Image: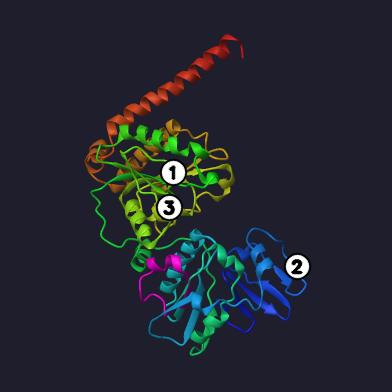
């Protein structure tokens, strides 16, 4: 924890220390990896280099750019201690803010001798249960606009006056969380969800660079769902959520895409995740909540995302590593994953999902045989059809290899 002082500046999602005319980012979040110090008058960089993270701070920091108090809503609980810690979960990205919130909730469980003040974007407040934080400052700004580096000190300071010890609590986006504790402090669902409904869901992005094969995504989803229909019962609902565009899916696909986001839609999407056996999409922060609520997530990784594997999954304490490797699947493609065709993706998904069920059985230590257990407990998944399909798919590949072997032998290669 960092002790509050007159030098400490909270500027949107940046945390800095001001010494005369020199300002330095504190080693919190990405600033640990990308430190930066510069003179606020002449903009001379004293330490570090500019990059995707710290450049907005360098360009936009202004010592008089205080946030408009009208942009802040305050929720207050009873003061209990003489120590207080400030946690800032603002960011310029929804996924980062969401992860920061999750880890902020973890810290409230580990530090029970102090009050907490949280700074949270308005778009997340509906997920937070009441009574967790002593003071909740809800900021009504878009993620993108927070790059303007609004200074928050003036709206925070009145809440710190009655405390002997005041700290800034560094929050990161990496680590593991207790699933039980997390779910006790957040409202991902606004009602009891019917588990009798079973879905396979694709999260559809409308921005071109985040589509599966660009404009080919629409057809790819239909072909993928058509293929997968052979291996699940008729009761399974094939669903698309995410960004609505001008294209209409066939009637047998449940199209729940929207043109704009809202609290109501967040809860509707989360209900769909909770009913989903599998959620599929190009990887991104929209896959964080599916990683909590659904049985299995499938992440298509374009080349520029290879080094970010598993960042869009919430990691829970005590999870079996074997099960986890089947529960969250990462498939690597080219720049827009066009080389992961629907046929190939179908094979990957049904093979790995079968593997998930088999490994779950092996870890359950029950007396029934594996096939009977899967058929009884996961009857939506057509066990015999999947195994028959896998056998033919493997034989077809092996025959190609054999043909190549004999051709090489014939020509002396």
Q: Which residue is mark 3?
A: 259
> In the image, residue 301 lies at what x, y percent?
52, 43
Q: Is residue 286 magenta?
A: no
Q: Look at the picture and state if 66 lies above or below 294.
A: below
Report if the CB atoms under discs 2 and 3 are less than 8 Å apart: no
Q: How many marks?
A: 3
* Residue 136 left/right relative to 14: left
Residue on which the image places disc 2? 45
Q: Is residue 375 above or below residue 319?
A: above
Q: Determine the image quadrant of residue 193.
A: bottom left
Q: Nearer the viewer, mark 1 or mark 2?
A: 1
Cα distance between the residues tagged 2 and 3: 42 Å
* Image spot of residue 175 (x, y percent): 49, 61
Q: Is residue 326 left or right of residue 307?
A: left
**Of residues 224 and 362, the one drawn nearer to the viewer in this rendering:** 224
180 to 365, vertically: above or below: below
Hey, which residue is sitting farthest front in the picture?
A: 246
Which portion, as a residue range, is magenta? 117-135
Q: Earlier in the sequence, mark 3 or mark 1?
A: 1
Give the label on residue 246, or none.
Answer: 1
Q: Nearer the viewer, residue 265 or 38?
A: 265
Q: Quadrant for residue 14, please give it.
A: bottom right
Q: Is residue 298 visible?
A: no
Query: Badge 1: how crowded within 10 Å, few (<14), some, or many (20+)?
Result: few
């Amino acid at each position: 924890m960092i002790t509050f002082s007159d030098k400490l500046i909270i500027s949107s999602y940046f945390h800095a220390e001001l010494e005369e005319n020199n300002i330095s980012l504190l080693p919190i979040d990405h600033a640990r990896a990308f430190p930066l110090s510069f003179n606020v008058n002449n903009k001379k960089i004293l330490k570090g280099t500019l990059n995707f993270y710290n450049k907005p701070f360098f360009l936009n920091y202004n010592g008089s750019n205080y946030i408009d108090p009208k942009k802040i809503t305050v929720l207050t609980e009873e003061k209990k201690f003489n120590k207080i810690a400030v946690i800032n979960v603002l960011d310029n990205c929804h996924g980062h803010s969401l992860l920061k919130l999750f880890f902020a909730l973890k810290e409230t469980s580990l530090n029970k001798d102090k009050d907490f003040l949280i700074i949270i974007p308005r778009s997340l407040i509906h997920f937070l249960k009441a009574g967790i934080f002593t003071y909740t400052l809800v900021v009504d700004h878009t993620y993108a606009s927070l790059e303007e580096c609004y200074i928050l000190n003036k709206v925070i300071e009145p809440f710190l006056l009655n405390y002997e010890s005041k700290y800034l609590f560094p929050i990161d986006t990496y680590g593991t969380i207790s699933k039980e504790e997390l779910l006790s402090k957040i409202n991902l669902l606004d009602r009891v969800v019917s588990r009798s409904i079973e879905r396979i869901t694709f999260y559809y992005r409308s921005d071109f660079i985040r589509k599966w094969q660009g404009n080919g995504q629409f057809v790819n989803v239909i072909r993928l769902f058509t293929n997968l229909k052979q291996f699940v019962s008729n009761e399974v609902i094939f669903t698309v959520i995410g960004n609505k565009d001008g294209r209409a899916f066939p009637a047998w696909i449940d199209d729940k895409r929207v043109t704009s986001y809202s609290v109501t839609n967040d809860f509707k999407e989360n209900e769909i995740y909770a009913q989903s056996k599998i959620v599929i999409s190009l990887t991104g922060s929209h896959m964080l909540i599916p990683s909590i609520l659904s049985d299995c997530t499938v992440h298509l990784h374009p080349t520029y995302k290879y080094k970010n594997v598993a960042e869009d999954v919430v990691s829970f304490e005590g999870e079996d590593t074997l099960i986890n490797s089947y529960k969250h699947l990462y498939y690597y493609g080219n720049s827009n994953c066009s080389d992961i065709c629907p046929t190939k993706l179908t094979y990957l998904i049904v093979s790995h999902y079968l593997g998930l069920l088999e490994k779950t059985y092996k870890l359950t230590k029950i007396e029934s045989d594996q096939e009977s257990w899967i058929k009884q407990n996961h009857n939506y998944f057509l066990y015999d059809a999947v195994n028959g399909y896998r056998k033919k798919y493997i034989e077809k590949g092996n025959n190609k290899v054999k043909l190549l072997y004999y051709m090489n032998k014939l020509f002396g290669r």
